[in-house]
Every structure is written in structure tokens, then in C-alpha cells.
Amino acid sequence: MAKKRKQEPEPEEEEEAVSSEEEQQQQEDSDDENISTEEEDEVAEPAIIPAPVIRSSITSDGRYHNKQRLLLLSSRGVTARYRHLLEDLRTLIPHSKKESKLDVGKNYSNGSAGGGYGAAVNEIAEVRGCHTALFLECRKKGQDGYLWLGRTSHANSAYKEDDSGNISKKQLMIAGGPSVKFHITNIHTMDELKLTGNCMKGSRPVLSFDKAFDTLDHLKIVKHLMVDVFGTPRGHPKSKPFVDRVMGFYYADGKIWVRNYQIMEEAATTAKEAHAQKKLTGQTQATSLIEIGPRFVLNPIRIFRGSFGGQTLWQNDEFVNPNAIRALEKKKKGEEYVRRKGAERQRKRRKEAIVVPEDPLAHVF
């Protein structure tokens, strides 16, 4: 009987275990129903897609890799205006190297194409280790100014041939050319303009080009050369890690108009002005441009394949030589002089032809 009494509570324990399992099953079913309703709600609501993160295609490690240098020089016989322009360009281009005035004959040649000034500039660039050159040539006692931009032949020594003896595409692109010849006019220097704009010396500029530089073929070449000449390399020892100015290149009337502006950011003085500014532009600070100078106009004449010479890739048919313009002006003045002298001779003959007859009654009274 004792054994039977000990065995009696076992069915009760089994019933309690079964009831606990049923409760757990019911709870799991309710959780599944809640999850299914949540999934239906999520399907019903539109999914929010996060905006894509815009990442820069150029990754920089902060080191000084672009070690190109600019040779900045002029020919002998430049006027004060051109000399002050070169001084302004030296202050704006920290990666430039100054050189004394160049005075060579037209027959000068050092075994390179281009002869004259072209051969001399390439030789100086090779000695100074410059990849690009800005050469200001003056003619007719400073009346005409011509600006040369181009890559020098020094770029050949920066790259070597491959193991197979082939030259890389990069070397073919920069090996001694191309070069552009401009006629520079309407020059106004910083001291002459008295503009209120100012920027840090050695700061890197933002180069702004007109839409025409991406559509016209010859302007595409000019754009690449101007980026190499006026664009300061990142991390240059003489440059400052600031971007506080904009250099604008605009194409109008077949000419390139060059301007230099300061980037000015002004904060609003009152909360009302800040609210209005933020409503218009989305920022509380107002950004404006103030001209610094210098300013000048470049009229492209010809694009050469080599460095300061070689095959002509493009030629401006609308360009008129300043000598021809001065000859026409002198011719007009000469024609005016001829007309004036002819009128004097006609007036003299007319006076001689007019003869007053004698009056018979002149002696009566």
C-alpha cells in the first residue's frame, strides 16, 4: 500500500507539465500573430531608402605628389605695365620660378625645335627643372605683347621607357608640348585698379572656366594648359592650405577674359537677416566675390603641337595682326591728309579763277 501511495502523485505532475507546455504553445502562437501583423504593417508602409553617400573619386593621402614647376619670364624690352603684370602673376602663382629677361637672336638654336626664343626657353626650363612655361614676348618697342603658354621639353626626362621599350600614354601627352600663343591686351594690374579684394599670398585658387571650354576643341587644349599653369599643386611648400580666391576664364567675342576674385563670406548681423539668408540660400552666411586683380584679355592666335613651335594644330582665322591695324590707321590718316591738301589746292585755284571786272564808273566821282 505504501508503494501505491507513493505512485499516486505522479499523474498530477504530468498534468501540470502538460498544462505548462500548452501555455507556452499558446504564447508562441500569439507572438507569431503579433509578428505577422507587424510584418503586414511594414509591407503596407513605403520603405524609406537612405540617400546615397557621395564620396570623392580622388583619394588623397595629404602628401606632395604633383611637383610640377612653372618658368615665368619675359623678353627684353618690356614696358612697365608688362613688368608689373609679371610681378602680379608671380605673387599669384607660388610654384613659379623667376628668371631674368631673355635676349636672344632669331637664329639661336640649341638642337631643339622652335629656334629663337623657343629653344632658349626650353633650355632654361631644363636647367631650372620646370615642366611648364609662361613667356611674355614684346615687340615694336613694347606696343605689342604676346603671351606663350606651353609644356616644355623637360617633361621627357621625368618618364622613362618601359621594359618593352614602349613609351607610356602619359609621356606622349606631356612630352614637349602643346603650346599656345596669345595676343594680350587690356592689361590692368593690381596697383592700377585699386580694388578692395584681398587674399592670402600663396593660397590655392578655384579655377572657373566657361562652358565653351568644354565644347570647343581648341579651348579644351587651352583649358588643360591653364590648369597646369595657374593651378597650384596641393601640398606645395610655398603654398598655403587655404582656398580663398577664384580665377575666372570666360570666352566672349572670340577672346578669353581673365579675372581674379576673392571669396568673401559675411555673417548676418541680426537673427532676422540670418533667417532671411537661410531661407534664400540654405546658409546663414552670405557668399560674394570681390575682384582682386589683375585683369587682362587673351586673343588666341595659334596652337602648336611642340613646345614653342612645331606643327600647327589650330589657327585663328579671325585674328588680325596689330601691324596691319596700325598700317590701316596710318593709311586713313594719310588719305585725310591728301584730301585736305587737295581741298587747299582747289580753294587756291578757285580764288585765282575769280576775277572782278573793272567798273567803268569807278573814276567818275
Image (cartoon, rainbow, N blue to C red):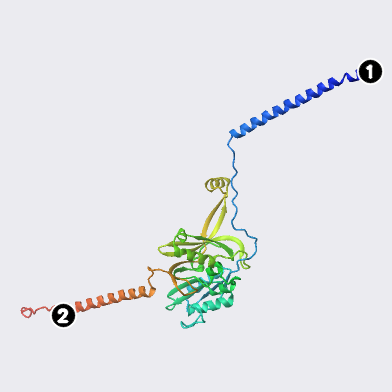
Residue at left offset 47%, top offset 61%: 213
User: Nearer the N terminus, badge 2 or badge 1?
Assistant: 1
* 301 relative position to 290: left or right: left
Please name the residue that numbered disc 1 is placed on.
2
* 327 relative position to 295: left or right: left
Residue 99 at least partly seen: no
Between circles 2 and 1, the one closer to the viewer is 1
Which of the numbered marks, if any, corresponds to residue 358? none
User: What crowding class fits label 2: few (fewer than 14 Cα within 10 Å), some (14-19), or many (20 or more)?
Assistant: few
- The amino acid type of the residue labelled 1 equals Ala
Quadrant in the picture for the C terminus: bottom left
Residue 179's spot in the image, x, y percent? Answer: 48, 71
What is the spatial separation of the Cα atoms under label 2 and label 1, in whole angstroms? 175 Å
- The amino acid type of the residue labelled 2 equals Glu
* 334 relative position to 5: left or right: left
Residue 174's spot in the image, x, y percent? Answer: 53, 69
Please name the residue that numbered disc 2 is placed on.
352
